[in-house]
Amino acid sequence: MKLFTGLGGVFTGLTGAVIEAWAQLRIGKLRVLLSLVGVAVAVAAMSFVIAVGQVSVSAVNAVMEQYSGRPGTVTISVSPTWRGVSRPDDDAGSDDSGGAGGSGGQAGGGGQAGAEGQAGGGGQAAAGSAGGAAASSDTSIRISEAMSAFVDRYEIGVWATTYDTSIRFAFPDGPRQVRTQAVSTGYGLLHHTQVTQGRWLRSDDADDMSPSLVVSQGFLDAMGVETLTGPLTVTSYEPTRTTYTIVGVLEPEDLSYCTTTDAEGNTVPCPQSLSAFVLNSSYEQQLPVHAVRPAPSLEVWTGTAGASEIKQRAKDNLDAQFGQGSTQVTDNLQSANANLSTGAFTTVVSGAGVFVMVLGALGLVNISLVTVRQRIHEIGVRRSFGATSRRIFFSIMLESVVATIVAGIVGVGIAVVALRVVPLGAILSDIPVPDNPPFPMSAALIGLVAASGVGALAGIIPAIVAVRIRPIDAIRF
């Protein structure tokens, strides 16, 4: 009870001091306003520059993560060696690096789909995967099941499976082969996949007979459609004749730096690339039973601290099923460490901003000293009625703190408006900054904290002068 009573007394005293400080500011609002112009401008400039830096760095890191995944992502792929385990009978006579009776497409260019291969007797095309060459259907299914069991066993929350394939779609100007990634729904979260029209793939898409697609802007342009206003269907010829449903469109690539030459020799902008994402479970339901398909790669997000542990567990678990040395694990910690940071930049800008605010607060110090001299009689009367030195000290100091906080709020408001008005895309032409980015909360907090600190420093000298005034001398003044 005594503790609550003491805390209540402190809170009441602090509230009273703040209210009193605000009342004094309203009395001398004109002189206070003039002295705080520099503080408000400094807070606005500092908050705006920090916000621009953080938005720019976030945009660059998001682009990097679209390719390598979130920092701490581990990629797991399996190429069975079959040493120490019995090779399945139904795989006997077939080559794990290709299709039965035919050649599988080899992955080229760091995981890009290469040439097509024909499945024996079926005439079905398949492409290589990021994890390696195409495997037989039974082997791919076994690898997928092992990866699912691994995710369930270790209760991994953020994960995705993926492999590259190739689908021949029907376009108005004729059929085209499109590099397609068969992924699970978690891929969009791991890689910050931006969908500007429609939506990303969902787990309930697996129940649809028409597999869902998320396509590039170039895919939509090739279909002769400007905007995706609703689900749009497209027919495929290979690897099987199926009707797909386009549910989303990826963010267009920034190709402002790229030009090419048309048939007439004119220089024109490069076209958007032709690519697509399909939900792997929905896509595989359409394939023939013995169609050659790539083995998937598993990506799991563990954070930077858990990457080494999950890598070792993956090797132990999957090598036990597919043979020693069959599991390849990599992480993106090197690229994560290469991600840009705003720490040093924020420190430098904050230091410069605080220095400017201190210069602006010197005027507030002078005005506060003059105000204290004018209020000597008032301070003496308050001391004679029992006001303690602590109460006098904090009431004078809080006047400066409250004033600079108000100036800081005004400055942050100016910075927020500036971030909306200033065309960052034109100024930072080489950085893919989004339109109307949210204002970073940390930039606003740094501005307010700096303003409060400067106000406290500016109020200490007048407060000390007020405390040293003797009540008897103040009453006679």
Image: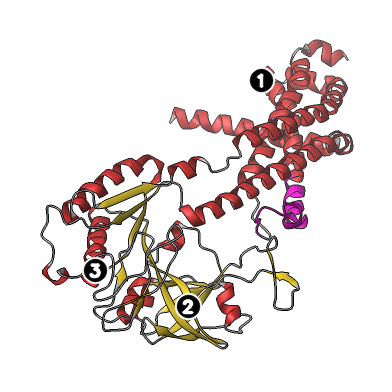
Amino acid carrying mark 2 in the image:
Gln
Task: Give the mark nearest the N terminus, 3 or 1.
Answer: 3
Of the residues tagged 3 and 2, which is closer to the observer? 2
Of the residues tagged 3 and 1, which is closer to the observer? 3
Residue, x 27% and y 72% (percent of image)? Answer: 99
Tell me the quadrant of the picture where the N terminus can be found.
Answer: top left
The x, y position of residue 288, in whole percent, is 28, 82
- Left or right: residue 305 versus residue 4 is left
Task: Give the mark nearest the N terminus, 3 or 2.
Answer: 3
- For the record, the magenta segment spans 412-434
Mark 3 neighbour class, 10 Å CA radius: few under 14, some 14 to 19, many 20 or more: some
Instruction: Tell me the SS state at disc 2.
Output: strand
Amino acid carrying mark 1 in the image:
Arg
Of the residues tagged 1 and 2, which is closer to the observer? 2
209 above or below 354?
below
Q: Which SS does the magenta portion mostly show?
A: helix
227 above or below 188?
below
Residue, x 76% and y 73% (percent of image)? Answer: 266
- Residue beneath label 3, please? 141
204 and 209: which is toward the camera: 209
The x, y position of residue 291, in whole percent, is 28, 77
Amino acid carrying mark 3 in the image:
Ile
Instruction: Tell me the SS state at disc 1.
Output: helix
Distance from disc 3 to disc 2, alpha carbons, whole Å, reads 25 Å
Q: Which mark is residue 26?
A: none
Based on the displayed image, in which of its 4 quarters is residue 41 positioned? top right
- Residue beneath label 2, please? 177
Q: Which mark is residue 390?
A: 1
Residue 422 colored in magenta in the image? yes
92 and 319: which is toward the camera: 92
